Amino acid sequence: MSIELYDNQFKEGRKIVTVKDVEPEAFIKAFSQHLKRQGRFEIPKWADVVKTSKAKELPPNDPDWLYVRTASMVRKVYIRKGMGVGAFKKVYGSQQRRGTCTKHFSKSSGKIARYCLQQLEEMGLVEQNEEGGRVITKEGQRELDTVAVQAAAEADEADE
C-alpha cells in the first residue's frame, strides 16, 4: 500500500532526471562546457601536442578535447563503478593500422586517463575504491545530476 503512495508521488508530473536518463552525447557536451566554465579543471602544457594512443598519428583537432574526454570518463564512472586506468585504456583504445599487415587493437594512453581521474579526484567528484578503480562521490553524483537536468531541459527545448 505504501509503495503505491510513493509511486503516485512521482507520477504527478514530476520527472526525476539522472545521468542515465539523458542521451550520452547531450550529457557529455553539457558537462564538458560545465567543466570549462568552472575553471577548476587544469589543462596541462602537453595537451595540445600529445597523441591519445600509439595507434594515432596526430593529436586531436578539438582544442577542448580534454574536457570532452573527462566528461565521458566521469559519465562512465557514474554508470559503472570501479573503473580504473586500465579499463579506460581499453575503452578508448582503437585499431592500429599497420599498412599492408592486419590491424591490431592497441590501448589508449594511460597518462591521459590517469590525469583526468586525478583532476576529478581533486575536484571531489570521484574517489578511489578499496577494491580498485574509482567510484563517484555523493557530491559528484549531485553535480552530475544537476548537469543532467540542464542537458535534458536543453534537449526538450530543441525537440519543440
Image (spheres, helix red, strand yellow):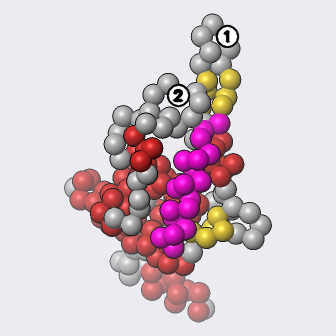
Count of numbered tags? 2
**Residue 38 at x, y percent in the picture:** 33, 67
Which residue is the extreme one toward the front? 45
**Residue 21 at x, y percent in the picture:** 46, 62
Observer-nearest of 11 and 135: 135
**Residue 146 at x, y percent in the picture:** 39, 72
Residue type at the position of mark 2: Lys
| Label 1 – label 2 distance at C-alpha | 16 Å
- Classed neighbour count for the residue bearing mark 1: other residues with Cα under 10 Å, few (<14), some (14–19), many (≥20): few
Q: Which residue is mark 2?
A: 56
Residue 106 falls in image quadrant? top right
Q: Which residue is mark 1?
A: 101
Task: Based on the picture, tell me whether residue 123 belongs to the magenta stretch.
Answer: yes
| Residue at 26% across, 53% down | 159
| Residue at 51% across, 73% down | 124
Judged from the image, the secondary structure of the residue bearing numbered disc 2 is: loop
**Residue 114 at x, y percent in the picture:** 59, 54
Magenta highlight: main SS: helix
Observer-nearest of 27 and 38: 38
| Residue at 65% across, 19% down | 103
Residue 30 falls in image quadrant? bottom left
Observer-nearest of 127 and 15: 127
| Label placed on residue 63 | none
Question: Seen in the image, is 90 located left or right of residue 62?
Answer: right
Residue type at the position of mark 1: Cys
Which residue is the extreme one toward the right? 131
Task: Based on the picture, tell me whether residue 136 belongs to the magenta stretch.
Answer: no
Which residue is the extreme one toward the bottom? 2
Judged from the image, the secondary structure of the residue bearing numbered disc 1 is: loop
What span is colored magenta in the figure?
107-125
